[in-house]
Amino acid sequence: MTEEQFDKLYSALTEQANITRGLVTLQAKEALNMEDVVLLTGLSKSTIYKLCWAQKIPYYKDPQGHTLHFKKSEIEGWMLHHRTPTAAELAEQARAHCVSNPR
């Protein structure tokens, strides 16, 4: 293994260790900062700021209005809010509609 390959491998492992450490820390937190929400959702900082601006994601501001904070349970609820029904659920909805609206 060349020194360059070793450096790349070391960098990749260090980055992965930092991500893992962040996820472990994230499990114990209820109040999240922007970096935590990026890690939890997989969205970019820019996307989260846009969602906040459009009031599409729940958030809090500090009293000075400079820092955004998030409640972990609210972010998890927001992430699970847009559920897609299964094929079986759609079929049941269609059946129920046809039964209740005969032609």
Image (cartoon, rainbow, N blue to C red):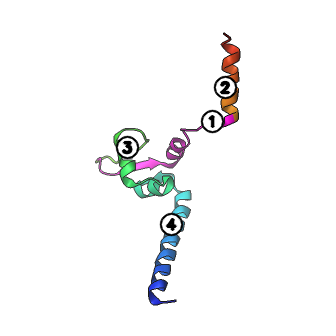
Q: Earlier in the sequence, mark 4 or mark 1?
A: 4
Q: Give the range drawn in magenta.
A: 65-87
Is residue 55 left or right of 27 when viewed as pictured?
left
* Residue at the spot of label 2: 93
* Comparing labels 2 and 3, the label whose residue is closer to the camera: 2
Query: Based on the displayed image, in which of its 4 quarters is residue 89 positioned?
Result: top right
Q: Which of 84 and 66 is in front in this view?
A: 84
Spatial CA span between label 4 and label 1:
32 Å
Image height of 15 relative to 96, above or below: below
Between the C-alphas of marks 3 and 4, the distance is: 24 Å
Q: Residue at x 48, y 90 (%)?
A: 2
Residue type at mark 2: give it. Answer: Gln
Q: Name the residue under label 4.
A: 19
Element at label 2: helix
Query: Between disc 1 and disc 3, whose residue precedes?
Result: 3
Q: Mark 3 points at which residue?
A: 52
How far across and how far down the image is residue 102, in percent?
A: 68, 11
* Inter-mark Cα distance, 4 to 2: 42 Å
Disc assigned to residue 85: 1
Residue at (49, 75) in percent of width and height: 12
Q: Are marks 2 and 1 in contact (CB under 8 Å)?
A: yes
User: Mark 1 belongs to which amino acid?
Assistant: Pro
- Residue lying at the far top in this picture: please name it: 103
Picture layout, residue 10 above or below residue 56? below
